[in-house]
Amino acid sequence: MNYLLIDTETANGLDEPLVYDYGGIIVNSKGEILEKFSFVISDIFYYRRDLMLTCYYSNKIPNYEKDLFNGKRRTATFAQIYNYTNYLLKKYNIKSVLAYNMRFDQRALNNTIQYITNGNKKYFFPYELDKKCIMCMAQDTICKQKTYKIFCLNNGYITKTGKLKSTAEIVYRYISFNNSFIEEHTGLADVLIENQIWQKVKRQHKKMRQHYWDKMV
């Protein structure tokens, strides 16, 4: 079985996010990466520069521009990445798509396609596609380990409400034994570490939530 893993970077705040960076991989059940992709969305990055300045990581804009100039990144319209995604789903017979924070990434992609099409399209992914959340899986497995709790307490990785942090960056620091790791916060780079978290989660062989709407285990 093959899977699609995706990550988005967005502008326009958290309430109505618009995608400007879309990255992903196709990975099989053995954990082998079959294909990678990364696109800067021209509709937002170039034509809504006012919104780009609202990005949480707007300081990275010059890095994107440099990579685009040097040919390290590709641009595409949002319509093109929508068509490309559906092409990949058919090519690899994909039934499940995963993201580290699926609730956010799905909302961002839906919001962007509604924005681009003036509401003519409402959903980015096909309805029947299973949409799984790696963060939920990690919270129910890796983040419940005693050593993870000790790791977070020792390093101050605690939320304002007193819970252990479970961001991809912190979880990856734990599983990679690299406490100095800094998440790049670009689409494809983030997907690659999130895939490693997912592969680690699968090896736990424990009961876990698959979707953000599932009940806590």
Image (cartoon, helix red, strand yellow):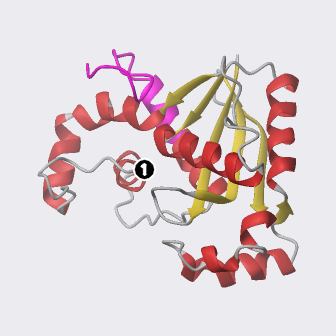
Q: Residue at x 87, y 49 (%)?
A: 80
Where is residue 69 drawn, in percent x and y? Answer: 85, 80
Q: Residue at x 69, y 79 (%)?
A: 49
Along the viewing direction, whichever of 114 and 173 lies nearer the viewer? 114
Q: Which residue is mark 1?
A: 168
Q: Residue at x 78, y 58 (%)?
A: 39
Where is residue 92 drawn, in percent x and y? Answer: 82, 24
Along the viewing direction, whichever of 118 and 65 lies nearer the viewer? 118
Examine the rendered structure and indicate whether residue 182 appears above or below residue 144.
Answer: below
Along the viewing direction, whichever of 140 and 46 lies nearer the viewer? 46
Badge 1 element: helix
Give the image quarter of residue 107: top right
Q: Mark 1, residues whose alpha carbon is within 10 Å: few (<14), some, or many (≥20)?
A: many
Where is residue 164 drawn, in percent x and y? Answer: 20, 47
Give the image quarter of residue 67: bottom right
Q: Give, as a three-letter code, the residue at label 1.
A: Ala
Q: Which residues are magenta?
A: 196-217
